[in-house]
Amino acid sequence: MSKPKIAVGALGGTICMSANGGQGGVKPSFSAEQLVGAVPALREMVQIEAKTLLALPSGSLKVQDLVEVYKWAKEQIAKGAAGVVITQGTDTLEESAFFLNLVWDEHAPLVLTGAMRNADSISSDGAGNIYASVLTAISPQSRDRGVLVVLNDTIHSALWVHKSNTFSLQTFVSINAGIQGLVIENEVKFIAPAVSRKIYPLPSV
Ligand code: ASP
């Protein structure tokens, strides 16, 4: 049986950063191919199309950028991807997810993820988040759930997800609603029905 296809698009953020030599801070260092390459287990499970779409801190993402992400993601579904994963900075991840969820008109899932710790940190979370996001993106149970956010092995609806803490790995929460599901020992388990949503046409301006 052929492996499912998944597309991974990278927009920037901590997940693609590493320490800036001895100069303090972090800088964008990894392409989408390198992010995916850091998770060798994926190669056995899926065929991946990885593309660096942008390399920005998430506060610099504009609505027009997200419109381009939407178009790219739809192209990947048209080319046969079972789902699409987008990596970006966590600061505006909930806003990106909310916007994309208003316009995402595919049965296949669009999954957003990021990282709280860059690749040089002890217990960096980027690779694990990409792995859990790809597992979620290929799960048949993820279909018709709109845009999902996956970090720290928890699956959230874009409608409710919120970054609640600036440093904790367990920062994404779905206040008032609860999580949609979990990734437990390589398995995606949904514990809540799909959140109903209205899909809007893409804004022309
Ligand atoms: N400042 C970063 C950003 O949102 C934080 C992160 O990626 O988690 O781009």
Image (cartoon, rainbow, N blue to C red):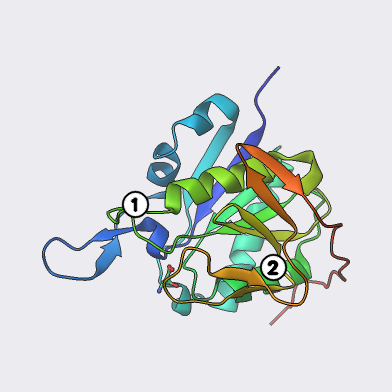
The quarter of the picture showing ligand 1: bottom left
Secondary structure of the residue carrying numbered label 2: helix
Please state the total of marks drawn on the protein image: 2
Left or right of 51 in this view: 16: left
Q: Is 158 or 103 nearer to us in this picture? A: 158
Q: Residue furthest top?
A: 1
Relative to 169, say whether 63 is above or below.
Answer: below
Question: Which residue type carries mark 2?
Answer: Leu
Quarter of the figure that contains the N terminus: top right
Residue occupying image coordinates x 82% and y 50%: 107
Q: Is 187 or 79 nearer to us in this picture? A: 187
Per the rendering, the mark at residue 59 is: none
Residue occupying image coordinates x 47% and y 73%: 58
Quarter of the figure that contains the C terminus: bottom right
Q: Residues within 10 Å of mark 2 (few under 14, many from 20)?
A: many
Q: Residue furthest bottom?
A: 205
- Residue on which the image places disc 1: 30
> Residue 37, position in %: x, y?
41, 37
Relative to 50, say whether 117 is above or below.
Answer: below
Left or right of 136 in this view: 61: left
Residue occupying image coordinates x 61% and y 73%: 94
- Residue on which the image places disc 2: 100
Secondary structure of the residue carrying numbered label 1: loop
Query: Which mark is first along the chain, 2 or 1?
Result: 1
Relative to 139, say whether 145 is above or below.
Answer: below
Q: State yes or no: discs 1 and 2 in contact (Cβ < 8 Å).
A: no
> Residue 35, position in %: x, y?
41, 46
